[in-house]
Image (cartoon, rainbow, N blue to C red):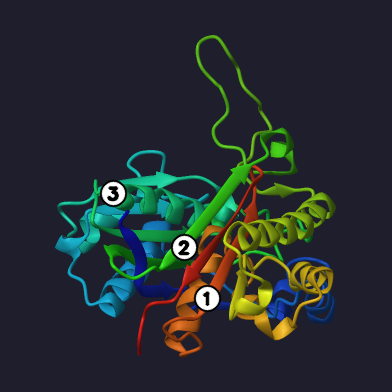
Amino acid sequence: MNEVQIIGTGSYAPLNIMTNQQMSELVDTSDEWIVSMTGIKQRHISQGENTSDLATKAALEALKDANVKPEDIDLIIVASTSPDQFVPATACIVQGNIGADSAMAFDISAACTGFIFALNIAMQFLKTGDRKRALIIGAEVLSKIVDWTDRNTCILFGDGAGAAVIEVGTKRGIISVDSASEGKKFDLLTCPTVDVINTFSRGKVDFKAKIDMDGKEIFRFAVNIIVSSIDKILKENNYTLDDIKYVVCHQANFRIIDFVVKRLKADKDKFFVNLDKYGNTSAASIAIALDEMNKTNLLNAGDKIILVGFGGGLTYGASLIEWTISK
């Protein structure tokens, strides 16, 4: 069986930064409250760049890091809950932007677990020999679907994109990916699209395409599913948490990660956190974190890491990876 490894990473966030103080000028909140409840200090907000723009810039960074030409990519997957439009896929726009003319390109929608789902899908293509080198991207401009009058949600989200290049090789690399969904709980985190309005249906007059979330239930689900996902992927591969250099959770809320650390009785320094700078960037968050770790030399060849996510759908998943990039 072919092995698959990550050979390069990249990320991009809009230059415009929105602080908690600026947020408090829009809704009834404060910097102290946001930091204490979420750990978020700021988030990057687009001033006009769309999801494909962010995804393209992250993709180019990943290609540069991997020392790979766009024409050598034969698969592009973009995970996003905030695509540019229904048609074409954001991945096709990125393909055109970077000149990856020989790539198959498509989008997936798995919310905040999107990058892990994309990693799993791409890995299957590569392991069967159908494709040789893939570019996977998590990209979001959540600011266009955030309800800026809802203080329970607007404080959480930011815009950004992260990418990784993966290829078939001889090194172990991606050891295991486990992902799943709980569709019965779909209504806990939603963002409507266009309503059914046609010759036979009048649709909803008060329709709005904005994020709506049951925060308490999502919090409870997140803590439980992160713990169980980590336990499962460790047991299936005969590892313990002591064998793992870092755990990279979806960056949603510091309190979620803190609860997980306590539940697992783990060293909190093992859990990488950068949500204070980006907020919750949904499908982009794990990829952005991974790129930051790569670019700041936190990872060495041979280190084992776990990526673990959860999100609307509900979706969840984890990946066990042996890092193969040498600096």
Tell me the crowding category of disc 3: few under 14, some 14 to 19, or many 20 or more residues within 10 angstroms, Cα based.
many
- Cα distance between the residues tagged 2 and 3: 29 Å
Instruction: Work out whether 320 lies above or below 81.
Output: below
In this view, the residue in front, 314 or 198, is 314
| Mark 2 or mark 1, earlier in chain | 2
Q: Name the residue under label 2.
A: 175
Instruction: Work out whether 217 lies above or below 273.
Output: above
Residue type indicated by callout 1 = Lys
In this view, the residue in front, 238 or 247, is 238
Per the rendering, the mark at residue 92 is: 3
Residue 148 visible, this angle:
no
Image marks 2 and 1: residues in contact by CB distance under 8 Å: yes
Quadrant housing residue 274: bottom right
- Cα distance between the residues tagged 2 and 1: 9 Å
Q: Mark 1 points at which residue?
A: 304
Residue type indicated by callout 3 = Cys
Q: Where is residue 23 in the image (x, y as percent from the top left)?
A: 71, 72
Q: Where is residue 245 in the image (x, y as percent from the top left)?
A: 58, 81
Q: Under tag 1, what secondary structure?
A: strand
Frontmost of labels 3 and 1 is 1
Image marks 3 and 1: residues in contact by CB distance under 8 Å: no
Residue type indicated by callout 2 = Ile
In this view, the residue in front, 141 or 222, is 222
Image marks 2 and 3: residues in contact by CB distance under 8 Å: no
Residue at figure coordinates x 63%, y 41% from the top left = 181
| Mark 3 or mark 1, earlier in chain | 3
Frontmost of labels 2 and 3 is 2
Q: Under tag 3, what secondary structure?
A: helix
